[in-house]
Amino acid sequence: MVSRVLGFVRDILFAWAFGSGWVADAFNVAFRFPNLFRRLFGEGAFNSAFIPLFAKKLEGEGRDAARQFAEEAMAGLLFVLVLVSVAAIIFMPWLMYLLAPGFSSNPEKFDLAVLLTRIAFPYLACMSLVALMSGVLNSFGRFAESSGVSIVLNLTLTVAIFIGFALGFHNDPQGGVIQALGVFVAGLLQLALLMDGLRRAGFRLGLRRPKMTEGVRRLVSLGVPGIISGGVTQINIMIGTMIASLQPGAVSQLYYADRLYELPLAIVGIAIGVVLLPEVSRHLRAGNDLAVMDSQNRSLELAMLLTVPAAVALAVVPVEIIRVLFERGAFTVTDTQATASALAIFAWGLPAFVLIKVFSPAYFAREDTRTPMRYATISLFANTAGSIGLFFLFRSMGFLPQLGIALASALGGWLNAMLLWSTLAKRGQFVLDARARRALPIVVGASFFMGAALWIGAFYLAPWLVSAQPLWVKSAALAGLIGGAMVIYGIAMAATGVLRASMFRRQARTAA
């Protein structure tokens, strides 16, 4: 939660400083690559393969064997990513034609995107080490350090914005360079945080010469499919960025919309997914199938209880949310309308993206990463085809073409989630119990009732939410609108018995 709030502060300041102009587009493309790898490695996809193997070594052969496996995995991972980073930095001008083909029509934007990506790219090597160390700490039941790495990133980039302004670099390329340097510095600080966490856990890791041992070979066979399946949402966003580069300003507008719907995705979906994987793995090793099913059902119930109303709110009042958060400085009224339209479409895919995070651990804990990979690949191809087709269809119809990308992303998320669910149900590995079957329809019904209340409230509060109002007036009106909707939803959930304090206490105990 702290990380995402700080991320919002960072995005608000970035929108104020850069808006959705060509410098913002160039930085957002440059940031997509390290951000993609941060999500793939730092938020569970890599650890979906590493944690079960490391835990098995730890419990079956002891700490020394587990340390040896972790060091071998770290050596191989670091070796590969250093090679990838060096090659990418050298060939970045050619890679940029793939990352953002639309930038080629603007040489100044193209050259800046190449420069910023080169500066930020070494962040990947830092994140490879951070990811593995996070997996080790998670296996020991320590989640604070791995959760804190995003806090470090957001604080560092926020400081970089203020440094740029102090030096007189406003909405210009030099400000973008300082932001890219901030990404690299953040990687070093995140690595220092995780190393200190390992030291305090009494589990130090040393560097070894890369070697393809049996354990590393098993990690690769599980890890590559796991990274693809666990990171499909981010890969979809990367593809959307490539296509959006054909429309000026679209990259940044999609970025701001993406950041908003990722708040509940990160807080609910990723947090539950990260905690659920070691819990399910532990129950499976103990042969406690009832505990496995209960953990999965309660995680699904809690995820939907928190996610569905968030999705409805983002879809019903996106303009008001964007206006209060971002509309100032270089971020204009036109940017608000375009970003809000994308956010409203993204919102309908939010429950699907969270469901992917809830369903995937059921596969990963059983060391089955290939099935999620197949479904992720199907979803990826569907999203790519849909993004290209809808982008040009919407453009020909006079609509904002980037809205086609948002729609394809939402539909691709639902396709992936339904494929994962149907297979788990067919195998009998994720069966809804009576409590979940009762709760889920109530959650959906109460969320839509809350959405109606939001729509009515926004109508009556409209005079206090217009652009001309001072920021404190708009903020107070939006806070009252959202707060009132939350109260209505909470009362409905408590009255029906779906919302129980015990659910949150249980998840807090598990996470601790």
Image (tube, rainbow, N blue to C red):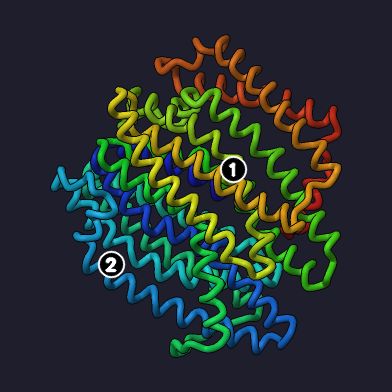
Q: Which mark is residue 335?
A: none
Q: Which mark is residue 352?
A: 1
Q: Secondary structure at mark 2?
A: helix
Q: Is residue 256 shown left or right of residue 308? A: left
* Nearer-N-terminus badge (1/2): 2
User: Distance from label 1 to label 2 (Cα)?
Assistant: 33 Å
Confirm or deny contact between disc 1 and disc 2 (CB under 8 A).
Answer: no
* Residue occupying the point 79% across, 26% down: 491
Residue corresponding to mark 2: 88
Q: Quadrant of the C terminus?
A: bottom right
When the figure is inspected, residue 452 is found, relative to residue 421, above or below; the finding is above
* Residue occupying the point 33% across, 63% down: 121
* Residue occupying the point 59% across, 25% down: 479
Q: Quick one: 405 or 195, which is closer to the camera?
A: 405
Instruction: Tell me if mark 2 has few (under 14), some (14-19) or many (20+) residues whose alpha carbon lies within 10 angstroms of its own.
Output: some
Q: Quick one: 444 or 129, which is closer to the camera?
A: 444
Say whether residue 5 is visible. Answer: no
When the figure is inspected, residue 334 is found, relative to residue 435, above or below; the finding is above
User: Residue 295 sits in which quadrant?
Assistant: bottom right
Q: Position of residue 490 (x, y in %)?
A: 75, 29
Instruction: Tell me if mark 1 has few (under 14), some (14-19) or many (20+) residues whose alpha carbon lies within 10 angstroms of its own.
Output: many
Q: Position of residue 13 (x, y in %)?
A: 40, 39
Please, what is the three-letter code of the amino acid marked with disc 2?
Ala
Q: Quick one: 387 or 80, which is closer to the camera?
A: 387
